[in-house]
Image (spheres, helix red, strand yellow):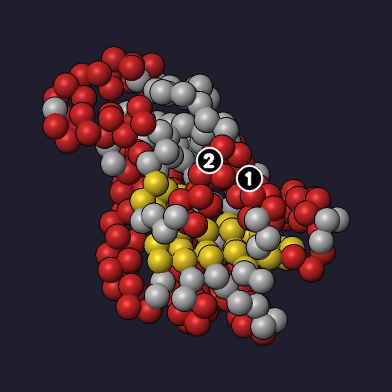
Amino acid sequence: MKTVMITGAASGLGWALSTAAFERGYRVVMVDMNAVLLEARAEVLGRRDPQRVASRALDITDAQALQDLVMWLHNNGERLDVLINNAGITHRSLAARTASSVFRKVMAVDWQAPVDLTLACMPLLRESRGAIINIGSMAGWMPVLGRAGYCSAKSALAQFFEVLRAEVAGDGIRVLMVYPSFLDTPIEKNALGHDGKPARHSRSMIGRMQTPEWMASGIFDALDAGKKRLFPDRFTWFASLLWRLAPDLYQKLMVRKFASELEQ
């Protein structure tokens, strides 16, 4: 039986991924910092088959906690076939008004933690000739007003794992980068404002709002198909092309669409 470990597994896309993985026959190791919700979610799946669910409550920005997690995998004889770096955080605030602590937190969750966890899991992934799935964002491909830190972190995530893919291909390890746009998940509801407190204004968006269940199914289909990159939203894919081919026009359209961000 193959094992998948998912960060941010208790809500939003993480919960949809946990459910989809379970339904596809994986043993699911759920990781989340919300211990109460994580226990409840794990119990839901555990009622169907307790042998195929495990959970660990921890903060993925805690380097020691990540080391302890990997040690727990080793000590319990767990195999690891798929690591899904899903946990994330965003902000909605103008760059010039945002505290540096907000940028550091976003970078710690969205870039440093996935990198640290992946590197710690490399021995297990080499042994299983497994796969790494990273939940990036189209914001890593093109600028979005009010998301300077988020865009930076997701861009760094993409660059790191594109390099890593080439470096570990000889070990049989695959890397799938996923680039969704707007999903109906708590990440935007929990967005930070310029001062690190919850953002007080609603988000701007382009394209259609998609469900996490739709995205989770697409991710596992892409994994099964051996894809390296998944661009599930055609509208934002075209927007990213516009950014590359006509950046000035893209900037003008973005400012018009996200004008409310400039008022914050």
Which of 187/93 is in front?
A: 187
Q: Is residue 52 above or below residue 88?
A: below
Image quadrant assignment for residue 33: bottom right
Q: Is residue 13 visible?
A: yes
> Identity of the amino acid at label 2?
Met
Image quadrant assignment for residue 47 = bottom right
Q: Secondary structure at mark 2?
A: helix
* Residue at x-position 38% and y-position 16%: 260
For the residue marked with disc 1, what is the amino acid? Ala
Mark 1 residue crowding within 10 angstroms, few (<14) / some (14–19) / many (20+): many
Q: Position of residue 76 (x, y in %)?
A: 70, 81
Q: Residue furthest front?
A: 225
* Viewer-closest of 37 and 217: 217
Q: Residue at x 32, y 43 (%)?
A: 140
Q: Secondary structure at mark 1?
A: helix
Q: Residue at x 41, y 72 (%)?
A: 173
Pointer 1 with pointer 2, Cβ within 8 A: yes
Position of residue 35 measured from the top left corner of the image (x, y, whole percent)? 73, 55
Callout 2 environment at 10 Å: few (<14), some (14 to 19), or many (20+)? Answer: some
Judge left or right: residue 143 versus residue 23: left
Picture quarter containing residue 187?
Answer: top right
Query: Disc count in the image?
Result: 2
Residue 246 is situated, as x and y percent measured from the top left of the image, at 13, 27
Which of marks 2 and 1 precedes in the sequence? 1
User: Residue 25's spot in the image, x, y percent?
Assistant: 68, 60
Which image quarter holds the C terminus? Answer: top left
Which part of the image, by quadrant, shows the N terminus? bottom right
- Image position of 256 with respect to 194: above or below: above
Alpha-carbon distance for marks 1 and 2? 8 Å
Say if residue 64 shows up in the picture: no
Q: Which residue is mark 2?
A: 215
Label disc, if present, on residue 16 of the rendered structure: 1
